[in-house]
Amino acid sequence: GGSEGTGAGDHSENTVIVESILGKKGDSPGKARNALATFIQLVSVWCHASAHAAALLMETAGENGGDLPASTNGAVGVVTPEFLGLAIDAASGLVAHGCLDDLYLKIGGGGGGTDNGESNGQEDAEEILREMNNIGNQENEENEANEVGSPSLIKKAVNVLVESVFVADLSSERTELSALKFLLTTGCRVSAIAANGENSSMLPPPMEPMLRGTHLLQTIRVCYHVYLKTGSMPNKTTAKAALQQLVTSVFVRLERAIERTTMEEKMMGATLEKDRATDGTTTKGKDAKGNSPGPPVFPSNDHRDAYLVLRSLCKLSMQTKNHPNPPAASSGSDNANNSAALTAESKGPSDAQATVLPHPAANGDTDPALESRILALELLLHTLRHSSGPCILQAGPQFHYAIRQYLCVSLLKNTTSPDTTIVELSLRLFVPLIRHFRSLLKTEIEAFVTNVFFVILDSKNSTIQHKMLVVTLFDEICSDSTTLAEIFLNYDCDLSAVDLFQRIVNALGKVARMGLADATGSGTSSLQFVAGAGALRAEKTRQDHRDLRLAAMKALRQILASLHSSIVTPVTSGRDDISVDEASLKLKKLIVNGEK
């Protein structure tokens, strides 16, 4: 009985302590804000403590010859992986329920609220708003504001949390999963903001994401790092899914921003036309000196975020260096070969990286550089397939530059890779590129087809698998009648361009006849004198050539079907698809009737 009473008393005392710090039901708004600030500060302390413990652990392992102590399991000190995971899960719940929307923290200065949170609440809020306006006008002086001795700094509460997770020790499966959940929830969350202007009610409501710029890129980077370093297959799958959702959400916001910008420009044009009709003036948008202001670098922050993500993925898809795993430390040197592209974009207060120790179950047989390139290509393919191609085409000249200088260069390097998976992903990326950006990349498409794809088909050193991938690419491109017709019109009908359509047909016809002499000549009888593994290899080679010829013939038949769909079948027929056999039969009837 005494022990039970003591336990109840300890529980009551702990409850009083926790409620005095983190608040309880029925607290005033001021005290609730103080409780949130206290919790965020505690999470930050715990994350940094775990990173410090991980650094000490790696230092100890270095002294012991690189062996991690089995008893610690990647964590030492009071901040255990289970405890840190629970704290990050609690932060995820706050983000998901909107408790941190538009919440700012005043760091330093000692000007926090009082104990009851009543007397200084309104004054603190007004002071924060004034300082936020000053910060918006002094972005270039951010480094000076972070110097030692600065009185205070206003930061978004969610930024403090994500910066803490960036530096946390993510060496256990528990903390990896909690961090992925938190970063996904935070990176995809948006909140509506009040729109100003007389025509704001006619426009879609502006949405403000919780993470932008540096913090968004670092979020993607940590998820990317977990995918490459984790030894848990469920966490690896979760990290990949989180990356896909994060990237997709960025380009969904881009589509909304383009829609809103287009509507604003139309409404502004209508207003200017109305003003001209009223007073007969033609001046617009001039400053006090009478000079027309130049256009902004990006129409909106959503444009900038999407551009940075696209450029970072393209750079990651070209990373070829493979260095040994460096020690995990707070200096930010780990995983430099796989995350350099994202690090280049991430300059600011959140440069610190997540500390991920080598996992005991990690598979050391895989090449991290190769896996990094494959993941980047998969994310690019997912982006182009699930986002509107015309949307990216209309996003502005910055995106045109990124497509030409980064994506096309990446495809050029990866289509000549000896790895079949990378070649396959690169060729699959070329399909949405030629369908959505053919008006922008006329010269580049011609160079790709003539200098890469035809070379692969004609070269004797190319593998059957690579040739099959190119034939499959042509089959998929030619399945779209509009794309096929535009290839003919833009290249074969242009005297300054190559006859691309004709050369595609000739190349497929050449592949369809490849190896027929060996198949019908003495190759079959020669198998009688080959036994064992040699006979199996010869039979497999002959079967591969047969499959390649069959794929080329199917691509040629697909061209006939697309030609029939775009030329013979009326556009208003209401039927887009037609089978290859039906197209061939109809074309044969037309030829017979023409001869008669």
Image (cartoon, helix red, strand yellow):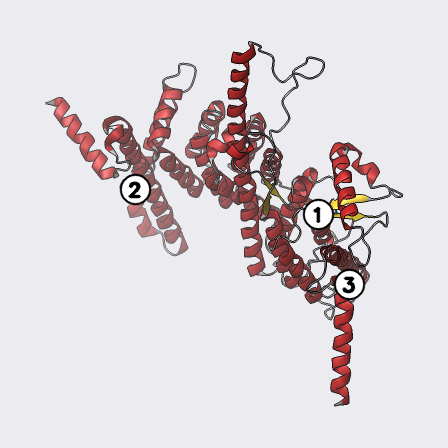
Marks 3 and 1 sit apart, C-alpha to C-alpha, by 22 Å
Q: Which mark is residue 159?
A: 1
N-term-proximal mark, 3 vs 1: 3
Q: Do tag 2 and tag 3 residues touch (Cβ < 8 Å)? A: no
Question: Which structural element holds mark 3?
Answer: helix
- Which residue is at the front of the view, 439 or 505? 439
Which residue appears farthest toward the left when viewing the image? 596
Q: Is residue 552 above or below residue 268?
A: below
Q: Do tag 3 and tag 1 residues touch (Cβ < 8 Å)? A: no
Q: How many marks?
A: 3
Question: What residue type is disc 1 on?
Answer: Asn
Question: What residue type is disc 2 on?
Answer: Ala
Locate residue 579, reporting x and y percent: 25, 39
Q: Residue at x 31, y 41 (%)?
A: 550
**Residue behind mark 3:** 21
Locate residue 261, reporting x and y percent: 54, 29
Question: What residue type is disc 3 on?
Answer: Ile
Q: Residue at x 34, y 35 (%)?
A: 479
Marks 2 and 3 sit apart, C-alpha to C-alpha, by 82 Å
Locate residue 83, reporting x and y percent: 70, 66
**Residue behind mark 2:** 519
- Which residue is at the front of the view, 30 or 165? 30
Marks 2 and 1 sit apart, C-alpha to C-alpha, by 66 Å
Judge whether residue 175 can be spotted in this image. Answer: yes
Question: Which structural element holds mark 2?
Answer: helix
Q: Residues within 10 Å of mark 2 (few under 14, many from 20)?
A: some
Image quadrant of residue 413? top right
Left or right of 575, for residue 410: right
Q: Residue at x 27, y 31 (%)?
A: 565
Locate residue 564, reporting x and y percent: 25, 30
